[in-house]
Amino acid sequence: MNSSFLPRSFVIAVCLLSFIPFLVGLVGVEFDLSLGEDVDEIPLVVQELIKNDPAVKSYYLLRGPFFYTILEWTAFCVAFFTGLLSFVHYRLKKDITTPIIGTAMLFTGLLDAFNILAADRLTFPVEDLDRFIPVSWAIARTFNVAILFAGALPFLYRKNPKFIETPPQETRYLILLGVLFSVSAFAITQIQAVVVPLPDALYPELFVRRPWDTVPLILWLITGLIILPRFWKLYPSLFSFSLMLCAVPAVMSQLHVSLGSKELFDYHFFSACFLKILAYCIPLTGLMLDYINAYRAELELQETESKLNAARQIQRSLLPSDYPDFEGLDAAGFSYASEAVGGDYYDFIEMPDDRVGIVVGDVSGHDLAASLLISQTRAYLRAFSASVTELSEIMTRLNKALIADTQYRRFVTMFFATIDKDRQGFSFAAAGHQGYLIRKDGSTDTLDSTFLPLGMNADDTVKVSRIDNIHQGDMLLIVTDGITEALSPEKEQYGLERLLEFIHINSNQNVRKLVQMLHNDVDRFCEGSPPTDDVTVVLLRWK
């Protein structure tokens, strides 16, 4: 299901429920509780009960007000709960659409509550229900759609509305807003009930039988056909879609009362009450589905994080657990990924004839696939290094194995150096990867690439270069481009020149401490900003 659409079955059900009262009315099946005082209109069974107890007639004639009370309190509960839930939703997700519906639902829900209390004469002494109920209905519906209209309209013309700063002391702000809504709803109800003489709002002989209700009807048509569809298009979500959908039963509700209802508690009046409840329930459903989707997404995120943590632990286990202790050499290194897992690795390999292998690899990308490929690369390289003597053949076999696995979809840059048994020189294969020989006198020789990155060309043999004039104190530095491309908050790169200068300045330190100092210097340079690429450094010094 698209994250911005309610389920199709739900949309169809809402449309059917919105039109069923109208269709049922066309065939003459009506639920009408608007009986007058004529006893002849009362069923015979009830007339027999009235003969024994006259009070039964009063209760029977109050069926309409009783049923109206039940519907209005249902509407209030749905509206009030939806309003509160929308503010909670806003606090959690910062979705700017939710305060709009929260404001409209909370305010109109309170109006419904105070109106039904007044209609039942529990708060104000309302004398003429024939005027109070139609007028209070029209005013409540007008406020409901007007708040939606006024709340949504500015966001159709505002840039980046989702980045509006949250008001300070937000909880107090929302509580104050709720108190103001309550006081306003109470005041409006009191004015209608006892302060202002209400006009006649019901004209059974006219085509438009409740003219006051044409105002919210017109506003709902404009809001439902123009404002809310544009709003949903700009800010697609389940919640904004539910706002658009609730216009269907809201419009049908107003059509029933404005064109169909001839008197209180007739079929069209109760149809309008039912459709109003339906209109309130739709945003509530949108909120609930949004919460369900968010909960499922959270579970999926936790599952993914668990898998990534397992992959991270496995990848870390592939790196050397401790610095090696090779005769005549001092070596150290570190590697960390820019994301949960990465595509860099380094290794120290004991090779036949007491040679030592130093390798740094960098797979294209730094995702889970890169992590898997680097694991394969390490396994291949260790296996070939244990059984094959020539460095060129080791790298050529590795290149062909990677091509067979990746089918040219990924590549690996690698610098692999084998240190001679007598420690007087070394051979290296650089597949799209450079190394740096830092002399004791401060000069630096760049060890350029000897072959394309592995996984790109299966036809040629990987070439090898040779360095013989090695002296005590010389250092071999191998890094991935993640360290040279590390960015400061000002977007300045750490750079190769800064890296080599740091090594030169601190060359009197032992290798392990020097590598740790370099790690700290890069962190200081980035000031806590995460690296954009995986970072790997290996440093080797001839004792």
Image (cartoon, rainbow, N blue to C red):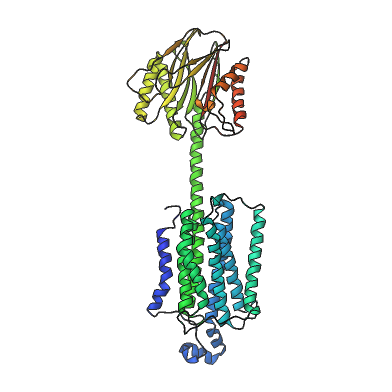
> Residue 113: x percent and y percent?
59, 71
Looking at the picture, tell me which residue is in the foreground, 262 or 369. Answer: 262
- Seen in the image, is 225 located left or right of residue 497? left
Residue 50, above or below 392:
below
> Residue 42: x percent and y percent?
48, 88
> Residue 304: x percent and y percent?
48, 41
Residue 349, above or below 273:
above
> Residue 38: x percent and y percent?
50, 91
- Seen in the image, is 85 located left or right of residue 209? right
Q: Name the residue at 52% across, 25% down.
A: 536
Q: Is residue 234 visible?
A: yes
**Which quadrant holds residue 430?**
top left
| Residue furthest to the front | 157
Q: Is residue 73 visible?
A: no
| Residue furthest to the left | 459
Q: How many marks?
A: 0
Q: Name the residue at 39% across, 80% down.
A: 28
Give the quarter of the figure containing the C terminus.
top right
Q: Name the residue at 45% across, 81% down.
A: 207
**Which quadrant holds residue 409?**
top left
Residue 225, above or below 442:
below
